[in-house]
Amino acid sequence: MKTIDRIFARSEPNVGQGDFVMRLVACIALSALVVAVLPPAGIGYRTIKIALLATAEVGIITFMLGLFLDTKTHVPGLQLFAAAMAMFWFVRRQLPWVAAVVGLLFLAAGIAALVTRRSRFNQIFNLSSIREVIENTP
């Protein structure tokens, strides 16, 4: 029951330092991918495929490094991986507009975490990357 309470409670700011920077990079990468998958951009399928798969790879590496080095950058890594793979799935089925909407949804979640400095994922798992919170943790 405690986890459910944490999901719905208003979280304290818990996004900071390297986590903030990585989320910013993830948002920039996602915005570039959203523009790339749109048909008016005129980018070929093979180029989009390489870009999406490379971004997914960067996301999974960031996720693994975040877990291994305890740097709290695993959320942006998951964001990049999940968004790129979902967008690739839709592009593969020749639905580029749906892929762009999916990318925009992931981008909106990333921007919300940047603006508010609050992350539901961090809240659920009781994570914080703000220096003051980390220094005061026993």
Image: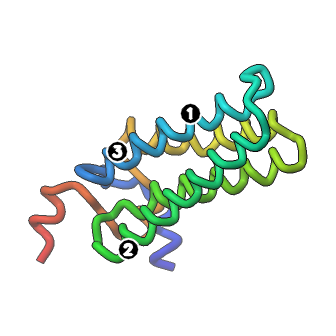
Q: Residue at x 57, y 33 (%)?
A: 32
Vertical placement of 70 versus 51: above or below?
A: below
Residue 8 shows in this picture: no
Amino acid type, label 3: Arg
Q: Of label 2 and label 3, which has the lower sequence position?
A: 2
Vertical placement of 119 versus 29: above or below?
A: below
Tell me the element at label 2.
helix
Amino acid type, label 2: Leu
Question: Mark number for residue 31?
Answer: 1
Tell me whether circle 3 and circle 1 mark residues in contact (CB < 8 Å): no
Q: CA distance from mark 3 to mark 1?
A: 19 Å
Amino acid type, label 1: Ser
Q: Which residue is mark 3?
A: 117
Q: Of label 2 and label 1, which has the lower sequence position?
A: 1
Q: Which residue is mark 2?
A: 67
Relative placement, left or right, of 105 versus 80 is right
- Which residue ends up furthest to the top in the rendered image? 40
Q: CA distance from mark 2 to mark 3?
A: 20 Å
Instruction: Pick whichever, 137 or 29, lies toward us.
Output: 29
Name the spot of residue 128 as percent of width and height, x first: 29, 62
Name the spot of residue 89 as percent of width and height, x first: 79, 54
Relative placement, left or right, of 129 versus 59 is left
Tell me whether circle 2 and circle 1 mark residues in contact (CB < 8 Å): no
Question: Mark number for residue 61?
Answer: none
Relative placement, left or right, of 138 versus 60 is left
Graded by Cα atoms within 10 Å as few (under 14), some (14 to 19) or many (20 or more), the crowding at tag 3 reads some
Q: CA distance from mark 2 to mark 1?
A: 25 Å
Give the colouring mode of the picture: rainbow
